């Protein structure tokens, strides 16, 4: 059974710092991997989706990488801002017709 | 452009009561789903639908019913609420049923407390 782990559970950094959020999964046979952002009291917002054949995806200051063989993905946030403060969740789709398996998230605080 | 709209935002029920959580989308998405989010458990899929008239069970379907009579709406019914159903419920949609490489769009959630 696929399991998704995000460490650390919480992270606090000063504004302007570049940072990396980690996601690991137990079964390397995945269909795709998605990164989401969740603000307090709100739903999830999709940030990046990486297909199994891709190594990375970029959107603005965000870059997500995927290494299936090692069961890892990272979300890189450049020049962090207080507005980046949120919980970031990683989710893996094990197969084409299987539901997403979510990690429990990393709560990020960017201090001005 | 409202996206995914969930109502109500908050609800308190007594054990044994029934209610329906509403989800409506205006993006003409074929795929709709319900998740629950619990502290320490992450998000878990309850039920999903790949189009009008088609529904299927997710990881934790017991105690919940769904139907999909239109493309726009996907209500979640609790027939006899239990304290274990206290959670935050999210509706999520995706543009098409066959390409699982489409991102999910989430509503803002319904916070349900069962006493």
Image (cartoon, coloured by chain):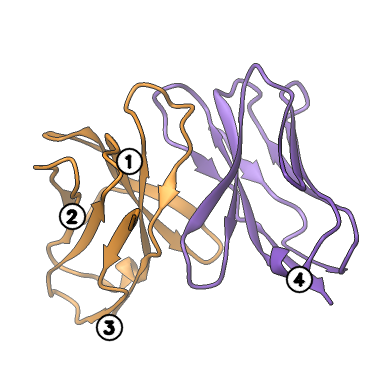
Query: Marks 2 and 4: CB-CB under 8 Å?
Result: no
Judge if badges 2 and 4 mark residues of a common chain. Answer: no
Across and down, in percent, residue B34 comes to 32, 50
Residue lying farthest front? B1
Q: Which residue is mark 4?
A: A82
Distance from Cα at disc 3 to Cα at disc 4: 37 Å
State how far apart marks 1 and 4 are (Cα): 36 Å
A16 over B59 or under it: above or below: below
Nearer to me, A56 or B88: A56
The orange chain is B
Q: Residue at x 13, y 45 (%)?
A: B67
Q: Secondary structure at mark 2?
A: loop
In what element is the residue under mark 1?
loop
State which chain disc 3 sits on: B
- Please name the residue that numbered disc 3 is placed on: B115
Between the residue at mark 3 and the residue at mark 2, the CA separation in whole angstroms equals 22 Å
Q: Nearer the viewer, residue B27 or A67?
A: B27
Q: Which residue is mark 1?
A: B58
The colour applied to the residues of chain A in this rendering is purple
Q: x, y (%) of residue A32? A: 57, 28
Q: Nearer the viewer, mark 3 or mark 4?
A: 4
Distance between the Cα atoms at labels 1 and 3? 25 Å
Secondary element at image label 3: loop
């Amino acid at each position: 059974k696929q399991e998704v782990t995000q460490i650390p559970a919480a992270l606090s950094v000063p504004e302007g710092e570049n940072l990396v959020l980690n996601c690991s999964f137990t079964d390397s046979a995945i269909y795709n991997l998605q990164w989401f952002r969740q603000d307090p009291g709100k739903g999830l917002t999709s940030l990046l989706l990486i297909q199994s054949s891709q190594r990375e995806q970029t959107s603005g200051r965000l870059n997500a990488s995927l290494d299936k063989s090692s069961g890892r993905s990272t979300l890189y946030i450049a020049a962090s801002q207080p507005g980046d403060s949120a919980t970031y969740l990683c989710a893996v789709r094990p197969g084409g017709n299987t539901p997403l398996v979510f990690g429990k998230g990393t709560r990020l605080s960017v201090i001005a | 452009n409202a996206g995914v709209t969930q109502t109500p935002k908050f609800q308190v029920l007594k054990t044994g009561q029934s209610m329906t959580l509403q989800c409506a989308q205006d993006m003409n998405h074929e795929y709709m789903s319900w998740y629950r989010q619990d502290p320490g458990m992450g998000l878990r899929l309850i039920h999903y639908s790949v189009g009008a008239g088609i529904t299927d069970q997710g990881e934790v379907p017991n105690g919940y019913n769904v139907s999909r009579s239109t493309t726009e709406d996907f209500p979640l019914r609790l027939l006899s609420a239990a304290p274990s159903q206290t959670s935050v419920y999210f509706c999520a949609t995706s543009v098409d049923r066959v390409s699982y490489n489409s991102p999910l769009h989430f509503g803002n959630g319904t916070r349900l407390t069962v006493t």
